[in-house]
Image: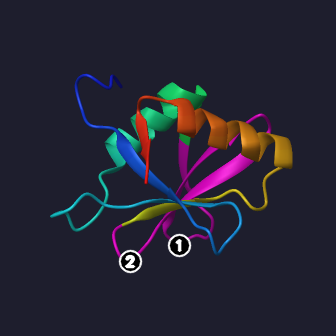
């Protein structure tokens, strides 16, 4: 994903919940489009996504593994997406957050 071809994916660090990163849906959209988010994370972190169900008839869970740590992307009913880095190793969490901050594919709010 190139920053010249599309606008950066916005992210917000939740100040009330440690390690929670939200990706708000664009204005005028009912939900965040997953392709730009997935492409930006793949390009920034060099990861590949997996889509699988945790339960037989449960919802599909989008996740990736970074430095041995599994990170799940949760899609909220509001249309936003979140990753919860609170359960991830401290060093891995800081590296992911620093990559998001420095990447041209993401924009902090």
Q: Nearer the viewer, residue 50 or 23?
A: 23
Label 1 environment density (alpha carbons within 10 Å; few <14, some 14–19, many ≥20): few
Q: Position of residue 47 (x, y in %)?
A: 59, 31
Q: Which residue is mark 2?
A: 77
Query: Of discs 2 and 1, which sits in the foreground?
Result: 2
The span from disc 2 to disc 1 (Cα, nearest Å) is: 15 Å
Residue reaching furthest to the left: 28
Q: Is residue 78 left or right of residue 12?
A: left
Question: Residue at position x 74%, y 46% from top?
Answer: 93
Question: Residue at position x 31%, y 61% from top?
Answer: 25
Task: Indicate whether 18 appears above or below 39.
Answer: below
Quadrant placement of the N terminus: top left
Q: Is residue 76 magenta?
A: yes
Task: Indicate whether 80 appears above or below 37.
Answer: below
Mark 2: secondary structure: loop
Q: Nearer the viewer, residue 7 or 1?
A: 7
| Bounds of the magenta segment | 50-79
Q: Which residue is mark 1?
A: 58
């Amino acid at each position: 994903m190139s920053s010249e071809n599309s606008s950066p994916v916005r992210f917000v660090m939740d100040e009330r919940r440690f390690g929670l990163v939200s990706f708000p849906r664009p204005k005028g959209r009912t939900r965040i489009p997953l392709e730009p988010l997935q492409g930006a994370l793949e390009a920034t972190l060099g990861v590949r996504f997996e889509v699988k169900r945790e339960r037989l008839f449960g919802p599909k869970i989008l996740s990736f593994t970074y430095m041995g740590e599994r990170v799940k992307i949760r899609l909220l009913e509001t249309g936003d997406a979140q990753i919860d880095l609170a359960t991830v190793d401290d060093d891995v969490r800081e590296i992911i957050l620093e990559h998001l901050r420095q990447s041209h594919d993401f924009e902090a709010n």
